[in-house]
Image (cartoon, rainbow, N blue to C red):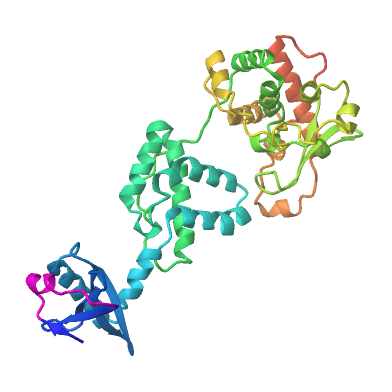
Amino acid sequence: MPRKKFTARSIAVIKAPDQGQVDWWDKNFPGFGLRVSFGGRKAWQVMYRHGNRKRRMKLGPYPALGLADARELATAALRDAALGKDPAAVKKAERTAGTFKELADEYMEKYAKKEKRSWRKDQSMLDHNILPAIGAFKAKDVARLDIIRLLDAVTSRGTPIQANRVHEVVRRVYSWGMARDDSLLVNPAVGIERHKERARETVLKDDEIKSLWETLDNAAAIVEAPFKLQLLTAQRGGEIKHMRRSDIGAEQDGLWWTIPGEFSKNGLTHRVPLAGQAITILLGLLKVGSADEFLSSDELPDWVFVSARTGAPRTDLWKAVAGIRKSTGIEFTAHDLRRTAASKMTGMGISRLTVAKILNHADPSVTSIYDRHSYDAEKRQALTAWGQRVTEIVTGETAAKVVPLRPA
């Protein structure tokens, strides 16, 4: 092992071997050396012990890395080795550390898609907001400032509420990752202040319902149907989007739409009575003349709101809301229609319990365990009365027949 006192001049005059490589070591700094290869390439290195094994670690190329800087790196590596660490292993882990995108992909495949019914929302947040900003970063190197800048950008082009949702996804990805990866020592999304949120309380007034309905009357059927059905049935947008003809059946008291647990928010199967305008809207959407044809046709797709391109449920049902807001001057979201139906029904004297059953709200109370009553009759009576009330609002005429309601 050739040794010499390392100086800028002594390093510069070391000649390359005729073949292979030669390791030179600093007389005054044990473990610090320079590997010189055939062809003239030179690279700094450090030799140390980890446990009972000798380890060698490359520090960097000469002359890009100067003598003083190389000595500093060697000193740090030997200090870590003295403390029981393995500098080479740390360096390799740093080099092979996964990106945030890799962590997020693993989170989606191994956790979200298996455990979260709303995983598609997480995926959308990642694809459109998070990954373009920090996806290429090493997951362990993402700093709180990076997250703050991401959230500020989302707020500037979207809303504070959307920024909160993005924040939640980043925090969940890191919380999941930290339980599985020792290299993730901190969650950079923790400790960042969220925007204040107020629960939405928008309930459309009667004149707003009339204006909205008239605007929808002049729209394409694919625009009209989901909005009107949400107002009439008080069901969630995702449940309406996944409506299938095979989930609708005729019984003695009329048509029933059974929402399977795989499409309901709380995972519980839910029965919704269909009557009056709701049936008319569905027949008009699929251009059939009767309920029997709607239920039994072999030519119609099973998905009511089907995409002709993919054969799957359409994903753009609610995109028309911005245009409708502009046409009517009414500030509302599609979900406000569900809230409006629920509020108006309780205002008509329909019991809150019946409305909760229509909304498919899970009841956590002890008594719910013993309550096996289906509430089908109450739900049909309530939605029939609400449908008649909507007719009165949009036509200005009193319905000829009003379903009597039980006292609230």
Give the image location of residue 266, x and y in percent. Answer: 66, 47
Q: Please identify the residue farthest to the front as the structure is shown.
A: 18
Give the image location of residue 274, x and y in percent. Answer: 80, 30
44 lies above or below 327: below
**How many tags in the picture?**
0
Start-end of magenta stretch: 5-19
377 lies above or below 180: above
| Quarter occupied by residue 245 | top right
> Which is nearer the eye, 271 or 137?
137
Residue 402 as seen in the image, left or right of residue 5: right
> Which is nearer the eye, 215 or 100?
100
Quadrant housing the N terminus:
bottom left
Give the image location of residue 271, x and y in percent. Answer: 78, 40
> Which is nearer the eye, 377 or 57?
57
- Magenta segment's dominant SS is loop
Quadrant housing the C terminus:
top right
Confirm whether residue 160 shows in the render.
yes
Give the image location of residue 174, x and y in percent. Answer: 44, 57
78 lies above or below 104: below
Q: Which residue shows up at 81% across the image and 21% down it? A: 287
Q: Which residue shows up at 45% across the image and 46% down it? A: 131
